[in-house]
């Protein structure tokens, strides 16, 4: 029995397949398939024609089985009509989408939507914003990617206990593939449903599940840990045909030449190598497609030249980055255009006695001699290296950006990361830097630093060095700037505590809390921190968009023990159009981590703008308060508050940890108290009612009204009591 088993679970499996045999005439399609999914997400991968879709159809009753059994939470499925199987709680996203050409997106969704279910049309539209834009378009008017999104959405709206998805990312653009991948991870984390994913995209299959079943010739050949399969290119090629066909014996690494600038000796793998890349389906296949003849595939093959992994004077090319227990500094960038500058910084870091690795992010395919060559990073793109080396510079840069971010997420042993580049290089490297935990040194020498760098830094702790002159060769200016950055990296790394010291500090430290504040909620936050500071390290974040992102970045890095998210005003700016806007991932860290969360509606009575003359014309008749010459506050309306409340409510529903959300009936800020310019009980009531109506209450997730202003002692007491009630006692420090 091949199992996707979680040892913590008891009772019948979500899905159990035993000895399943299916025939198409004399063809034996499924040959004794054994598969078990206890809970969470299980991926099944395999080449075309291995029986993956047949497995899905047999589970759903669309194809009869000759023998064997299929059980859903202990209930047999074989012999039941497909409609009965769907009503039992199994959703199905078929290959080929199967939409109605004449029905609009909205009509598709309304037809299957169930009132009171976890998934609603509005949640679908927030998950897939593109569908919201196309809600009035018919099925025949949607692109292939939009149709696939709609097929997934239709299945989710049935709120199934088990979701079966046959090639859910087929035909989707990389950005949508990433969105679907994130949705699957969220489903797994929330535990709302179990998911069986049939997928040819190895990156997605390995990212969404802990274990992956490999199908070969109608059988489950083996179950492989997702991390092992993602890293083992030979296994992928042997069992799945990824990268090249089994009959292709093109060598991937050419014979080594004698030394180069890295100090390699003869006999070590190095230098460029020609590799043929085959596409098994040169044209997008359909259910009626015939197998593509091998000669046609060979004629369509591309030949690319890549550099083989090489070694530096410190250590040969490593996969993973370093030996167990060792950490390294990464110097990353486009070596085809910035090689001189990057190697200059590498040599300074190495001279400081630190282990260092070069990461090449070039999209030209040229050989660079880096320890981590470009093609190794590109393999982490959702579509593999083909998603990076496209021949179109814009697409290639975007592809490498995504590949490097995904590569970084899977690495261990990163001591720090250093880079230099122009706008393109900065755009490629900064998302990967943001993926690293706060506290790991990150230095970016860039030409863009003289302008707004918020899009590059986000909520992370990236240090931006202005290059002054263009990063184009070494001269008296760039040498000094690049040297300063390299020495800064060496200095920061040298001051980082070792593993034993970090563990000792962790045991002595008070757990850190993320607390959000605005000027108009300052009294409440000050009172809360006074109450808790003996037990907790209260980190206060100014709710200006960047503040919320910084707090969530710390939580994602597991540097917070909980949230007191008192001031959620960034949501108002995001939905109405202010300058201190959150992004769509607001509350995402609480959703992903399950950390204890106490929240409120602080400063949702206002939207923030710059000087009065910068306020958009459409708001000219609204109520304003001039906070200072550079900040203008606008009172939110009843309708805006209702929309804000619904959005926040849906995000609270996505949290699996303990949640307490408090509503101050006496006003949400200083300016919303009786007699103050923003006091508007009707608008507040719309906000509160929208939250109460949207949030699905459970013992873990509650909403409570408090008859006080947000800054009153009574409300502070309620916040502190709520937090103490859900915070694990073992995490407190006196």
Image (cartoon, helix red, strand yellow):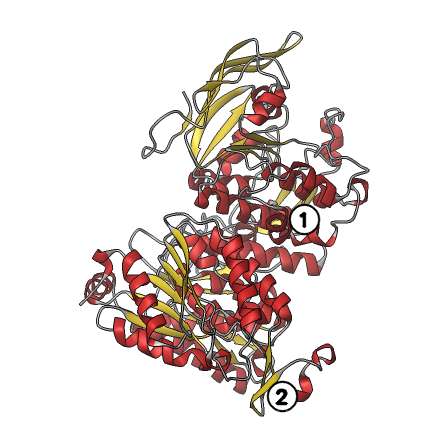
Q: Is residue 406 left or right of residue 387?
A: left
Front residue of 212/531: it is 531
| Residue at image coords 34%, 79% | 526
Please tell me whether mark 2 sits on a helix, a strand or a loop: loop
Q: Quadrant of residue 112?
A: top right
Front residue of 566/547: it is 566
Between the C-alphas of marks 2 and 1, the distance is 40 Å
* x, y percent for residue 481: 49, 82
Front residue of 85/357: it is 85
| Residue at image coords 43%, 21% | 74
| Residue at image coords 29%, 64% | 721
- Give the number of marks: 2
Image quadrant holding the C terminus, namely bottom left
Image quadrant holding the N terminus, namely top left
* x, y percent for residue 492: 35, 74
Q: Is residue 261 visible?
A: no
Q: Which residue is mark 1?
A: 173
Q: Which residue is mark 2?
A: 611
Please tell me whether mark 1 sits on a helix, a strand or a loop: loop
Q: Is residue 164 visible?
A: yes
Label 1 neighbour load within 10 Å: few <14, some 14-19, many 20+: some
The numbered mark at residue 116 is none
């Amino acid at each position: 029995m091949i199992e996707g088993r979680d040892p913590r679970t008891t009772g019948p499996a979500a899905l159990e397949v035993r000895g399943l045999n299916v025939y198409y005439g004399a063809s034996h399609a499924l040959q004794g398939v054994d598969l078990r999914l206890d809970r969470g997400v299980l991926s099944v991968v395999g080449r075309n024609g291995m029986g993956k879709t047949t497995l899905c159809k047999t589970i759903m009753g669309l194809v009869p089985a000759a023998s064997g059994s299929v059980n859903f939470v202990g209930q047999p499925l074989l012999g039941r009509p497909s409609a009965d199987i769907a009503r039992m709680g199994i959703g199905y996203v078929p290959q080929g989408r199967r939409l109605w050409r004449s029905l609009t997106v909205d009509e598709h969704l309304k037809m299957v939507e169930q009132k009171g279910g976890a998934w609603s049309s509005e949640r679908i539209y927030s998950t897939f914003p593109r569908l919201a834009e196309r809600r009035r378009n018919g099925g025949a008017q949607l692109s292939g990617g939009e149709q696939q999104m709609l097929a997934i959405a239709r299945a989710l709206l049935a709120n199934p206990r088990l979701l079966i998805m046959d090639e859910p990312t087929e035909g989707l653009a990389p950005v949508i593939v990433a969105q679907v991948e994130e949705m699957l991870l969220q489903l797994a984390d929330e535990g709302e449903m179990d998911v069986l994913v049939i997928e040819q995209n190895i990156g997605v299959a390995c990212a969404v599940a802990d274990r992956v079943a490999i199908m070969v010739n109608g059988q489950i050949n083996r179950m492989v840990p997702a991390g092992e399969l993602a890293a083992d290119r030979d296994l992928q090629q042997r069992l799945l045909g990824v990268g090249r066909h089994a009959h292709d014996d093109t060598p991937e690494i050419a014979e080594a030449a004698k030394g180069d600038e890295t100090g390699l000796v003869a006999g070590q793998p190095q230098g460029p190598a020609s590799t043929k890349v085959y596409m098994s389906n040169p044209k997008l296949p359909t259910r009626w497609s015939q197998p593509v003849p091998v000669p046609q595939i060979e004629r369509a093959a591309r030949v690319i030249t890549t550099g083989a992994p090489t070694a530096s004077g410190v250590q040969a090319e490593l996969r993973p980055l370093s030996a167990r227990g060792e950490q390294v500094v990464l110097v990353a960038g486009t070596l085809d255009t910035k090689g001189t500058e990057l190697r200059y910084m590498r040599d300074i870091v190495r001279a400081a006695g630190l282990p260092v690795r070069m990461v090449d992010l070039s999209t030209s395919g040229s050989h660079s001699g880096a320890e981590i060559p470009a093609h190794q990073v590109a393999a982490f793109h959702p579509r593999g290296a083909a998603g990076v080396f496209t021949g179109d510079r814009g697409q290639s840069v975007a592809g490498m950006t995504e590949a490097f971010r995904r590569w970084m997420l899977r690495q261990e042993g990163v001591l720090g990361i250093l880079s230099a580049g122009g706008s393109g290089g900065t755009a490629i490297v900064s998302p990967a830097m943001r993926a690293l935990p706060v506290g790991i040194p990150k230095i970016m020498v860039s030409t863009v630093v003289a302008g707004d760098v918020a899009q590059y830094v986000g909520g992370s702790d990236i240090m931006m060095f202005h290059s002054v002159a263009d990063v184009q060769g070494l001269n008296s200016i760039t040498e000094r700037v690049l040297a300063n950055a390299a020495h800064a990296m060496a200095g920061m790394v040298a001051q980082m505590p070792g593993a034993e010291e970090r563990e000792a500090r962790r045991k002595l430290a008070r757990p850190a809390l993320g607390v959000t504040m605005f000027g108009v909620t300052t009294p409440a936050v000050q009172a809360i921190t006074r109450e808790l500071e003996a037990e907790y390290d209260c980190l206060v974040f100014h709710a200006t968009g960047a503040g919320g992102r910084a707090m969530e970045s710390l939580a994602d890095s597991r540097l917070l023990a909980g949230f007191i998210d008192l001031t959620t005003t960034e949501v108002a700016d995001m939905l109405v159009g202010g300058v201190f806007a959150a992004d769509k991932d607001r509350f995402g860290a609480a959703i992903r981590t399950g950390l204890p969360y106490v929240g409120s509606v602080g400063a949702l009575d206002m939207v923030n703008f710059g000087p009065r003359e910068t306020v958009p014309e459409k708001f000219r008749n609204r109520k304003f308060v001039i906070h200072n010459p550079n900040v203008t506050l606008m009172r939110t309306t009843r309708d805006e508050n209702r929309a804000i409340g619904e959005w926040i409510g849906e995000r609270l529903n996505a949290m699996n940890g303990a949640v307490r959300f408090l509503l101050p009936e006496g006003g949400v800020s200083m300016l919303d108290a009786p007699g103050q310019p923003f006091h508007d009980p009707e608008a507040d009531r719309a906000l509160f009612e929208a939250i109460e109506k949207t949030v699905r209450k459970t013992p873990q997730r509650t909403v409570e009204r408090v008859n006080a202003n947000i800054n009153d002692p009574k409300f502070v007491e309620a916040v502190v009591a709520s937090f103490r009630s859900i915070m694990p006692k073992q995490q407190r420090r006196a």
